[in-house]
Amino acid sequence: MESGLKSLSKLFTERLLRIPDYQRGYSWTSKQLNEFWSDIEQLETDHHHYFGVLTLEVVQPKVSKQWADDEWLIGAKNFIPFHVVDGQQRLTTIVILLQCITEEMKSEDKLNYSTKDEIQSKYIFIHKSITEGSFLFGYEKDNPSYECLKSKILHRSSSRYTTGESTIYTKNLISAKKFFKDKISKLEKSELENLFTKVTQHLLFNVFNIEKEVDVHVAFETMNNRGLQLSNLELLKNRLIYLTTRLGESSNNIETLRRTINDSWKTVYYYLGKNPGVSLSDDYFLQVHFLIYFAKDLLDEHLTQFENSLHNVNGLYKSFLLEDRFTLRRINSTQPEERVTSTRLYHYAMDLKRVVEIYYQTNFPADSPFTADEKLWLSRLRRLIQTSHTREIFVLLLLLLPKQQDESARLAILQSLESYFFLTSVVTYRVKKKNLTLQIGQEVLCCAAGRTSLVEVVAKIDSQIRAFKADPSQAEAVLEGLAERGFYDWRELRYFMYEYECHLKFKSRRKSDKIDWDTFIEDNGEDHESIEHILPQTPSDPYWKDRLKGYTPTQIKKITNSLGNLVATSSPRNSSLRNRPFHEKVGNPDRKIAYKFGSYSEIEVALSPDWGPEQILDRGLTLIDFISERWGIRFASDKAKRKQLGLEFMSPPATST
């Protein structure tokens, strides 16, 4: 069938379009949907809009014969089956939009002289009988995306597939439908007809048919979808399926292997998208799995590329997987230990499937089989992971945790990890280099490779922690330098503030949380911060100016940015509220967005009758004492503590001894 520019109406003439199994699922989010809707809105009725290249591959009879539900359409109706190699995101979006248009129509309505049933038969579903028929566009293989498309989007029941499986891709499908339903509900009938005309007649695709001589898997890797790059996990799936076609093994073996790969990726995306509120990054999961699965290879062959750490992992894992390990060259290798075989592909896919469940549980401890105490410390580590620059080390250690069968040992490991990584976040580089130097990346790789145990790695960590705490002179290095640049720039500040909030909650004997971590960790910009300066950074009100009399501009800056002047808020404050006098910030019955109605930390601050440099110093010392109690650090004198807070020029509080 010839290539060239075609409207959607011509494209859906005697064509059966299927997304092959090596393709990713539906990945458009609100950004791409808004761009698409804007294109449609701006398109004038007498103009056409070029909608990009649509790359198709004719499906060979030996493959299409396996499509039991569609064989009648291909044989009796002369429909030509195609794989959508590039353009599936745009086609899926349009099919969802057309479905929403027909759902908005009444049974007697017509759009461009076409009834609701005629539009459905043209673009969505063609009936073979009252109960049977074929989808004109869909997925080739049975997977959660196809079931979601059929049942949740197109509202056609299916007895062949399971329901209720959620992935990142099914979430995107449902979000896209909601997006279009909301847009279309605001349109008049004439506007709906105009929209239908634009979509079916005025969007032009440059249809390109891939010839038999072109390797479709190789072509797929070079293609983009409206600038939305394929993730490395998506590219890897395509690569593995491509390699199955080059193994030269029996069709039964290849079919089993291909089914295993598809099932593993289905499981991976199920767990990455299982939590309804937070989707996990597929590429970050692939990166961490790479470190575990190929730990021995990395130690033996590639350790120099890490510079004895894990800092270069971002640049290494993609090239290792796609340019070194899973390549056509390795299929034909004469070295048995290097050769890619069906067995090795099978074990790799199965390990991805195994690890992703553990990965999910460590990210969402509440939905895990761990004990209550383990869940508490896993939650703390998860929060620390989100603020740390050593995330890969954290995650690797957590994924290795299930190898430790003893419950008390697991709990001790979690506590040691939290203590070590928090301490390394609050001491200076000078001290880390001298006293907390552990090639933790290499140690963890050795553990993943089976050359040492997790208990042994943690024992080395504990040894360094004890050595650090036993030396009183090292306490002065805690928080050193933060006073100069301001505690607000402390990378782990939100983790620390959240831990203090949990401490106050425990003291109050209350069960309800007043701060949601996932909201708290978000950066919403300068006007809506979740950590507030109590004494504002621009103290223009007479109340604040009066309390800062006698201090130099340099001292005022240090006071304002000191740790005791920061508070975790339960709801982001607008900048206009943050600059008000203290008693207005505390609030009254008429002002509910205020400290006395806020987080446990805010309520504690609201108990103070006044706020100025003395209160900031006093609260800063309280927070340092919390660090001492929570992480077991012995601090020096009160004078040293004031220096660490950047307030060495101030006198001790009257209550200090």
Image (tube, rainbow, N blue to C red):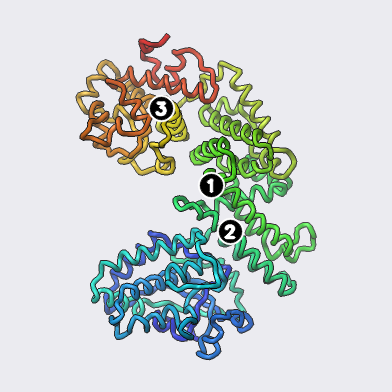
Q: Residue at x 35, y 21 (%)?
A: 616
Disc 1 marks a residue whose amino acid type is: Asp
Number of other residues with Cα within 10 Å of mark 3, as a class: few under 14, some 14 to 19, many 20 or more: few
Q: Of the residues tagged 2 and 1, which is closer to the observer? A: 1
Residues at circles 3 and 1 in contact by the CB criterion of under 8 Å: no
Which badge, 2 or 1, is on the more N-terminal residue? 2
Query: Residues under labels 3 and 2: Cα distance?
Result: 42 Å
Side (left or right) of 296 relative to 501: right
- Nearer to the camera, 380 or 205: 380
Rendered image quadrant of residue 421: top right
Position of residue 328 measured from the top left corner of the image (x, y, whole percent): 69, 65
- Which dot marks residue 367? 1
So how many labels did they put on this image? 3
Position of residue 585 measured from the top left corner of the image (x, y, whole percent): 26, 30
Which badge, 3 or 1, is on the more N-terminal residue? 1
SS at circle 3: helix
Dot 2 corresponds to which residue? 267
Q: Of the residues tagged 3 and 2, which is closer to the observer? A: 3
Asked whether residue 389 is in view, the answer is: no
Number of other residues with Cα within 10 Å of mark 2, as a class: few under 14, some 14 to 19, many 20 or more: many
Dot 3 corresponds to which residue? 508
